[in-house]
Image (cartoon, helix red, strand yellow):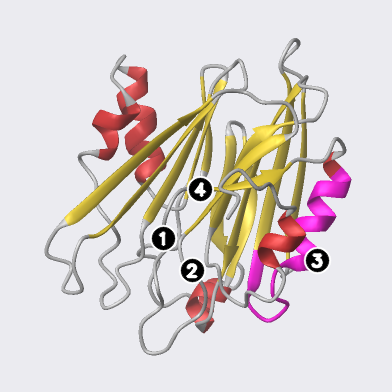
Amino acid sequence: MNVYEIKSMEQRLTGNTYPGRGIVLGVTPDGKQSVAAYFIMGRSVNSRNRVFCLEPDGIRTEAHDPALMKDPHLIIYHPVRESGCGLIVTNGDQTDTIWEFLSRGESWEAALRTRQFEDDGPNWTPRISGLQACDGSYKMSILKAADPEGNACARFFWEYPATAGLGHFLHTYVCDGNPVIPTFQGEPERVSIPADIDAFTRELWENLDENNKISLFVRYTDLKTGEKQQRMINKHS
């Protein structure tokens, strides 16, 4: 077994109907751009009734059809938000918790120790988070239930240097499941990062399950100038 094996996002996603929500952080092959991507998927009508909308400092989820929105709890949030020259990417409202802690000079670990997995038993969806620094290095975290009853929270943190052409992929679920969806296991998965934002956007979107994919956001940021390129795809568009 090669623990350092690097796979493409096509290889990571193909055949997996429900990895849930996913974060990819990394650096382009020339080492000149940091890369961040976030996607959401859904199985219920309420979960699928969403789009990404641009904000001045990132993106926000909104209801595609407000009349169909039954419960905004856990599905309406600010998944991508700038913090200085860095970028926060998460699958829930812990984005704002992290942002508030960082703005006070406190750590993102301290912020996430105030939070836990989502209250959607029996799945207890993990909270996944990423923090990309100005030099392209990044941190990732998952907060997940420590037992089937959701009585305790296990918190995991990883920190990665900026490595040309390499990224890490963290998602909420191993795969689809019934009645319980299995939560992500192990360390974030090593993935290759393409040089071109449009190629990476296509690779992600085309390999997410057609029935369950909802929205995708990708950002490439020049590490020297801070200039950014962004792509956003909504199934409801």
Q: Earlier in the sequence, mark 4 or mark 2?
A: 2
Q: For the point 46% across and 52% down, which residue is it?
A: 91
Q: Quadrant of the N terminus?
A: bottom right
Location of residue 191 with respect to 62 vertically, above or below? above
Provide the residue span drawn in magenta. Answer: 198-214
Q: At numbered mark 4, what does the secondary structure look like: helix, strand or loop? A: loop
Q: Is 205 covered by the magenta stretch?
A: yes
Q: At numbered mark 3, what does the secondary structure look like: helix, strand or loop? A: helix
Q: At numbered mark 2, what does the secondary structure look like: helix, strand or loop? A: loop
Q: Quadrant of the C terminus?
A: bottom right
**Hey, what amino acid is under mark 4?**
Pro
| x then y, percent, for residue 149 | 16, 73
Q: Which residue is mark 2?
A: 174
State the separation of the CA atoms marked 1 and 3: 24 Å
Q: Earlier in the sequence, mark 2 or mark 3?
A: 2
Q: Is residue 237 visible?
A: no
Q: Earlier in the sequence, mark 3 or mark 4?
A: 4
Q: For the point 11% across and 64% down, which residue is it?
A: 151
State the separation of the CA atoms marked 2 and 3: 19 Å
Relative to 132, is 145 on the left or the right? left
Location of residue 124 with respect to 77 vertically, above or below? below
**Hey, what amino acid is under mark 3?**
Glu
Q: Which residue is mark 3?
A: 206
Q: At numbered mark 1, what does the secondary structure look like: helix, strand or loop? A: loop
Q: Which residue is mark 1?
A: 185
**Hey, what amino acid is under mark 1?**
Gln
Residue 122 location, quadrant: bottom left
Q: Is residue 213 visible?
A: yes
Kindly identify which numbered label has been placed on residue 188: 4
Along the line of sight, the residue nearer the viewer: 225 or 18: 18
**Hey, what amino acid is under mark 2?**
Val
